[in-house]
Structure formats: structure tokens, C-alpha cells
Image (cartoon, rainbow, N blue to C red):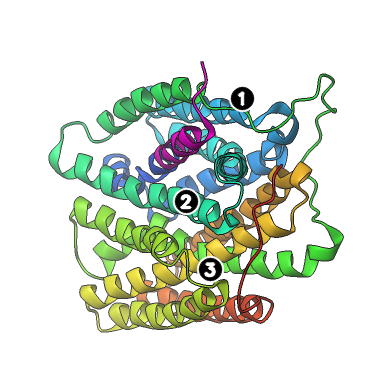
């Protein structure tokens, strides 16, 4: 039994959202693990970075294999790997186990992101062949970032109101993920699986020759934008305690939620705005938002800090959507998964590397000074990338959907 392509599109989108959500559920739980085991703040960034390492390695090794193994099959594997990480969280809750569980969870995301994005593009192309690619790109980006937004909020709710917050969330998501894997089996396949598939090889770090400059600029934008997400995903709870003297776990989850939710909402709300205007808005939001984040930390005013996070999140969401749309546009349809895998690999490097640097610096310098340096560097990077992307974007986009 198979559902139609239109229904399959939404099944993949919802599953994509749920798996991404589970990947950020631990964000407000880190202080609880830290309190229980009495480890320093840099260990939090190591646990977080383990997730990003899992994403990057799996993107390099498996992010492109759906081009010949099939989208549906690889998506099911990704969801089951995420379920395995839930089992590890439950069975091995010490720091080494947390690191391993986060690596495995990151591996599931690395397998999932490029595959789900390509599958959504192709399912939408079959269901709506005359529709512009921007809709599929926006839903994909919304599921990706919307899931990242929901995770911290869900984790905060468990931590604040429900028993066993280091156990119950993983049990709930284990069940949800297993159900999601079964439902995915109903979704149509969108690539022709060869009878004699090619030999496995790692991800090629290449893009179509005529699109390399556009890809490099878009990838720089994705990297710098995800650095902002890395700050709020890994260290926002620490800044709340150290800078603002706030110990509310739900607040920690709500702040991360608000940043990612702004990014996801912006992608959907502005989906029909021209790409050039989206990038103009992204530049303005990144500039204003990051300045407010810095002011909120210096004054210190929690409301200003949160407002800055929301505004910058909106800008980063539009910047990331533009980067994904660029990858989809320039990719060879037969190698779309490979091109998208490379884009996500670079984006998740932006999630990990700056967060690790910030976490390491917190062991030697005051939190406010570290945050200010981070803001200056990321502000320069996002504005540079966004400006270059805007220059290379036509005033109007009439690119039709490309079938695989």
C-alpha cells in the first residue's frame, strides 16, 4: 500500500520535523546533567559538539547514498538510528554515554537532512509539476528549523513539569520515532533504484562546475547562520545562569524555541516574497538582532537578549532557506542528494565549530566578553555572505520545479 505523492510529501515533512525536534530536546536538559554529574561548562560544549560531529561524519559518509539506494529506504534508516540514540540515552546516562548517544543522534540527522530535503522536492514535483521549487524548499526549511525549535521547548516542558526529565522524554520520542519509521513505508519512492547500484564511496566534495561560485557563497551563508543557532542550542542555558541568574529550565527551552521558531516561521511567511527581498530582510534582521543580543548581555537585560535572538533567528532562517534553494537550483537532479549533503555538512560545521570555541573560551574569559567577540565575528560573516548572495540573486525567480 502506498499513499499519493501529495500525502507522502506531508508525511515526510512531519517525520522530518519530529526527528529534528528530538535532536534538540536535550538543550534545556544539559544543566540537569551538569548538576547531577558536576562537570564544567566546557563538557557541555563537548557533548553538544559530539552531536555536530555525528552529523558531519554521516553527511560525508551517507548523506548522498539515497541517490541510488532510494529516498524512502534511507529515511527509514535515519529514523531508526535516531531511535537507537534514545535507547542509548536511557541505557547509558553517564557523560561518556551522553557523548556516544549524541554522536549517534547526530548521525541520524546527517542521514536525514539531505535525503528528506531531496525527497520533499521530488514528491512536490510529482504532486504539483508546475509549481515553483520555492514551496518545497520553504516546507523543507520549515520542517528542519521548526523541529530544531520544538525540541528545546519540549525538553523544557519535561524538565519543569513532568517527572524523570532525564528519562521520560527519551521514552516518549522512542515510541514516536518507531511509529514514524513505520508510516514512512507508505510514502512513494521518487528515484529509480538501479538493479546494480554503484559501489559505495564517501561524499564527493564537489558541485556542478557552473554553479561552484554560487554554491560557495551560499555555503558560507549557511555556515555563519548556523553559528547563531549553535550559540542558542548549546550555551543559552549557561548564559541564562551566568549572565542573567535565571535557573528556569522551561525558560531555557523557550529561548532556544523562539530563535528557531522565528527562523522556521519566517521561511513560511515570506515564502512567496522574491528571493532578493528575502535576502534584504535577512541582512537587516541579522544586523539588528545580533546587536540586540550583545546589548542584552552587556546591560544586562534578558528581554533585549531574547528579542535579539528572535530577530536574528528570523534573518538566519531566510539566509539558510536561500542557501538550500541555491543548492537545489544548481544541482544535477541525478545527484541532488549529494549536493544537498555537502550544503548541510558545511552548515553543521558552523553549528559545531563556533560553539566549541565559545565553550572553550568560557573556561578562561567572562561570559559577556566571549559573547561580544562571538557577535562581532558572526555579524561580519552573515552580512558578508548575505550581501554576496543578494548580488547573485535575480530580482524575480521564475525557475520551475526540476524533476529528478
Which quadrant is home to the C terminus? top right
User: What secondary structure predominates along the stretch shown in magenta?
Assistant: helix
x then y, percent, for residue 127: 55, 40
Cα–Cα span, label 1 and label 3:
30 Å
Q: Which residue is mark 2?
A: 139
Residue most extreme to the top: 1
Q: Which mark is residue 202?
A: none
Looking at the rendering, which quadrant does residue 216 occupy? bottom right
Residue drawn at x 84%, y 64% as measured from the top left: 210
Check if mark 2's residue and mark 3's residue have beta carbons within 8 Å: no
> Helix, strand, or loop for circle 3?
helix
Badge 2 or badge 3: first in the primary sequence:
2
From which residue to which does the magenta span run?
1-18
Task: Decide: few, some or many residues near mark 3? Use Cα within 10 Å; few <14, some 14-19, many ≥20.
Answer: many
Q: Which residue is mark 3?
A: 319
Residue at image position (22%, 73%) is 302
Residue located at (27% from left, 40% from top): 36
Q: Would residue 213 be visible to someone looking at this image?
A: yes
**Are dots 1 and 3 in contact, CB under 8 Å?**
no
Picture coordinates of residue 27, whole percent (x, y): 35, 49
- Point 66% across, 50% down: residue: 340
Q: Which residue is mark 1?
A: 73
Amino acid at each position: 500500500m502506498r499513499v499519493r505523492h501529495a500525502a507522502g510529501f506531508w508525511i515526510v515533512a512531519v517525520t522530518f520535523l519530529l526527528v529534528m525536534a528530538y535532536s534538540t530536546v536535550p538543550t534545556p536538559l544539559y544543566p540537569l546533567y551538569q548538576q547531577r554529574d558536576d562537570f564544567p561548562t566546557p563538557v557541555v560544549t563537548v557533548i553538544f559538539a559530539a552531536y555536530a560531529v555525528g552529523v558531519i561524519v554521516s553527511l560525508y559518509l551517507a548523506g548522498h547514498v539515497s541517490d541510488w539506494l532510494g529516498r524512502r529506504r534511507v529515511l527509514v534508516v535515519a529514523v531508526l538510528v535516531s531511535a537507537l540514540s534514545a535507547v542509548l540515552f536511557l541505557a547509558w546516562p553517564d557523560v561518556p554515554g551522553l557523548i556516544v548517544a549524541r554522536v549517534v543522534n547526530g548521525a541520524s540527522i546527517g542521514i536525514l537532512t539531505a535525503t528528506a530535503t531531496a525527497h520533499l522536492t521530488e514528491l512536490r514535483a510529482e504532486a504539483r509539476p508546475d509549481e515553483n521549487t520555492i514551496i518545497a524548499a520553504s516546507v523543507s526549511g520549515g520542517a528542519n528549523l521548526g523541529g530544531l525549535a520544538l525540541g528545546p521547548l519540549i525538553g523544557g516542558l519535561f524538565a519543569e513539569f513532568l517527572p524523570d526529565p532525564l528519562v521520560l522524554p527519551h521514552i516518549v520520542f522512542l515510541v514516536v520515532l518507531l511509529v514514524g519509521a513505520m508510516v514512512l513505508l507508505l510514502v512513494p519512492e521518487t528515484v529509480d533504484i538501479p538493479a546494480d547500484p554503484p559501489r559505495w564511496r564517501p561524499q564527493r566534495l564537489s558541485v556542478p562546475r557552473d554553479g561552484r561560485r554560487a554554491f560557495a557563497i551560499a555555503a558560507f551563508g549557511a555556515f555563519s547562520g548556523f553559528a547563531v543557532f549553535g550559540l542558542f542550542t548549546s550555551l543559552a542555558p549557561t548564559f541564562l545562569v551566568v549572565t542573567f541568574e535565571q535557573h528556569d529550565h522551561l525558560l531555557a527551552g523557550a529561548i532556544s524555541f523562539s530563535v528557531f521558531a522565528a527562523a522556521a516561521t519566517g521561511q513560511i511567511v515570506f515564502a512567496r516574497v522574491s528571493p532578493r527581498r528575502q535576502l534584504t530582510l535577512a541582512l537587516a534582521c541579522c544586523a539588528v538582532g545580533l546587536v540586540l543580543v550583545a546589548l542584552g548581555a552587556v546591560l544586562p537585560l534578558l528581554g533585549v537578549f531574547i528579542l535579539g535572538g528572535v530577530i536574528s533567528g528570523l534573518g538566519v532562517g531566510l539566509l539558510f532557506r536561500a542557501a538550500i534553494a541555491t543548492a537545489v537550483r544548481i544541482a544535477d537532479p541525478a545527484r541532488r542528494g549529494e549536493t544537498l549533503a555537502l550544503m548541510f555538512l558545511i552548515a553543521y560545521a558552523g553549528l559545531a565549530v563556533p560553539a566549541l570555541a565559545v565553550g572553550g573560551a568560557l573556561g578562561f574569559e567572562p561570559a559577556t566578553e566571549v559573547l561580544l567577540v562571538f557577535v562581532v565575528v558572526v555579524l561580519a560573516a552573515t552580512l558578508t555572505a548575505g550581501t554576496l548572495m543578494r548580488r547573485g540573486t535575480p530580482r524575480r525567480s521564475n525557475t520551475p520545479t526540476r524533476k529528478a
